[in-house]
Amino acid sequence: MALKAEIVSIGSELVSGQSLDTNSRWLSAELGALGIPTAFHTTIGDDMDDNVQVFRIASQRADLVLVTGGLGPTQDDLTRDALARTAGVKLHEDAGSLAAIAALFARRNRPMAERNRIQAMLPDGAEAMPNPVGTAPGVWMKVGRAAFAAMPGVPYEMRQMFQEQVVPRLRQRRWVERVIVHRKIALFGKGESEFEAEALDLTARGRVPEVGITVHDATISFRIRGEGVTQEEAWAQTEETAALIRSRFGPLVLGEGTTDVVDALVAELNRTGATFATAESCTGGLLAQQITAVPGVSANYFGGVVSYANRAKTEFLDVPAQLIEAHGAVSPEVAAAMAQGARARFGVDLAVSTTGVAGPDGGTPEKPVGLVYLGLATPEGVETRRIEVGPEQPRDVIQRRSTKQALNWARTTLQSWPEAGGSR
Amino acid sequence: MALKAEIVSIGSELVSGQSLDTNSRWLSAELGALGIPTAFHTTIGDDMDDNVQVFRIASQRADLVLVTGGLGPTQDDLTRDALARTAGVKLHEDAGSLAAIAALFARRNRPMAERNRIQAMLPDGAEAMPNPVGTAPGVWMKVGRAAFAAMPGVPYEMRQMFQEQVVPRLRQRRWVERVIVHRKIALFGKGESEFEAEALDLTARGRVPEVGITVHDATISFRIRGEGVTQEEAWAQTEETAALIRSRFGPLVLGEGTTDVVDALVAELNRTGATFATAESCTGGLLAQQITAVPGVSANYFGGVVSYANRAKTEFLDVPAQLIEAHGAVSPEVAAAMAQGARARFGVDLAVSTTGVAGPDGGTPEKPVGLVYLGLATPEGVETRRIEVGPEQPRDVIQRRSTKQALNWARTTLQSWPEAGGSR
């Protein structure tokens, strides 16, 4: 049976944008790991008509509806009432819940306010789900084709109730039988549509296992969905596809998990034992910052120079002033000299440099905003590359894209270098 | 007329819980500022039936439907098609959009993949909303009682399209009548609770204009809400409160808008004409990166050295090797020498330095993770400060907090310096 879940978050502060709803994401991920796909997230404010309408729609299109919020003691906590109206039943006071609420106040040595009584109200035919860490009990009831589980909006109360009350009920109903894993393989070095074009067979609808593509900052991720009775079986289902992606895209593969270009570069530095330095103009320290954000890189990364002013290029990187005169600071000649200067002055195996026009101002017809030259110095010599991120891009995007290109150039260069201890 | 908005986010990675949807929150807040309440957030995966069903429901219960995602060039981007099906119309290729997409690729000197053509498809009767920063144009069309605005899922593309394309259309339709402005005044230099205690009168419930407090990375922001028929009227309502905050908190005020410590520092650099450089160890380039993220700072900021390895401290900042021997790289002595070295070598008025233990490893009982020394060199000499961010803090927090302290120290120092052209 293919189940469909819907998650409903209730709270005016959520729908107005004052607070960010993180419960839905957490619940979706938990359900996914249990093999129950979530088809809908719906967020609504503390409005009775909207609540009833959304519950009715959910009761028709989903098998399982997880509701968070609206179980508090105040007038704008409507979940109990809205559930009863949707199911067309009355509310009654649940003795067990009332006792539990009273006991909680007793434990906290605080008097139970009269208004907390309302939290013991339960739609006829519903089960109360005990809340050991808060005053609001949850509600489990069948409405239409769907089973509803209403939980508090407070994340730690919701999480405990989900694990201790909801999951056992799902297992009881044999809704939890299969396990789903998601594997993420990150790639960099081509445009999204180029990757997509080369992966049409993988992303084809109905393929097993299913493969999706997401993009973040020009890093493409393939998401492989594996399903099975056990974790192992679900994982095994992804193996062949993962291997296929790795073999097809080879050096473009950064790695698995939350890996990005910089992590893959650091892995190559550790593998080769190569030492590395940076010389930055237009990226202004972003390269250095991204590398040093990764812990334990100090054995390989000696440091960097942010040579924002031309005199800094000369003072710290031995870029001849007349070279800057002749070609301008944004030129392949200066990019090359910066990389070579950094390599020599830091005494490292490998150095990269950036010089360009990050904008928004400073562009010219010959050297528009978004034009960046990269330099790469190795024992074999120095090379440069020209990138154009596009004059319409904001400064931070130009800086991030050119940083990523520079990091990736260092990474792909190191791929051909021997293991640490090898000749170098 | 009481409008109702619905926000629909599309993406399997969202509904499965792999990624967190932040677009809906941002859009709700923006609509709220325009006086349009959001009643529903709905999130769905890349499934045609779900898309069409959700669009149909939205077209019946909302006046304005903002859609994000599903406009990419890949097979699982269904928004254009789903909108057409919901409206019962066909898709056609929009010549203007196709030209714009082709032009974007041309500007980036990259071939346009055949797949990108699909991004120029438009439902009959719809208007294309140009996307100056990405390949996916937006879609504006009427479906049922609702106006739909479909935007890309990439946040900065979505935000720009909302401001430049959607808001004007809302004003055109007179859906935006009352103007609500939010003025944000940022402060730094005290704990949140201290600021709160000194602002109880401002943040009192029911006060007009309303004032809220938010905290980001130890920067406190007062948000003043002004309302009126015109921008001017709404703004005028905030003036007195803004002036009160400025006078009460004086030098702790960083400025208005999205201002943070670094922006206020750059403003002081521009005011004084002082020249500035950085020398970083544990912050690894974050200082330089934050400063150079601000456009037009190159006249004042000459650059920085990321002296991650000790030999880089000696080579570029003239820190005596014996000094590092004697006191260790994480010491006030080395922090002072780094700042002085940077000031001398860059030839600037002011230089700051950082050296510390960013963790997660490398801590000792004497020098625990989170211990950072700052140095500040000026014409008057050099000073150092000791910060302890706390060993339990993650690496990125330790790096961000100490960077912010260093930037703020430079800022407050410059506050007593004369205007540019004054004696220095």
Image: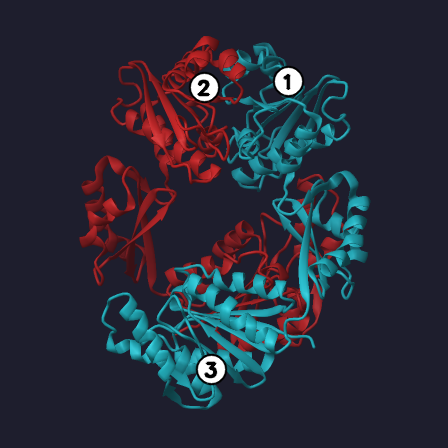
Chain colours: A cyan, B red
Distance of mark 2 from mark 1, alpha carbons? 20 Å
* Quadrant into which the N terminus of chain A falls: bottom right
Residue found at x 57% / y 70%: A40
Q: Is residue A91 above or below residue B21?
A: below
Q: Which callout, 2 or 1, points to the residue nearer the camera?
A: 2
Report the side of B193 relative to B266 (left or right): left
Marked residue chain, label 2? B
Can the viewer see residue B325? yes
Residues at marks 2 and 3, common chain?
no
Q: Quadrant of residue A369?
A: top right
Q: Is residue A35 above or below residue A387?
A: below
Q: Is residue A338 above or below residue A52?
A: above
- Percent x, y of residue B339: 40, 18
Q: Is residue A320 above or below residue B175?
A: above
- Percent x, y of residue B173: 45, 68
Q: Nearer the viewer, residue B20 or B418?
A: B20
Q: How many marks?
A: 3
Numbered badge on residue A348:
1
Distance of mark 2 from mark 3, alpha carbons? 63 Å
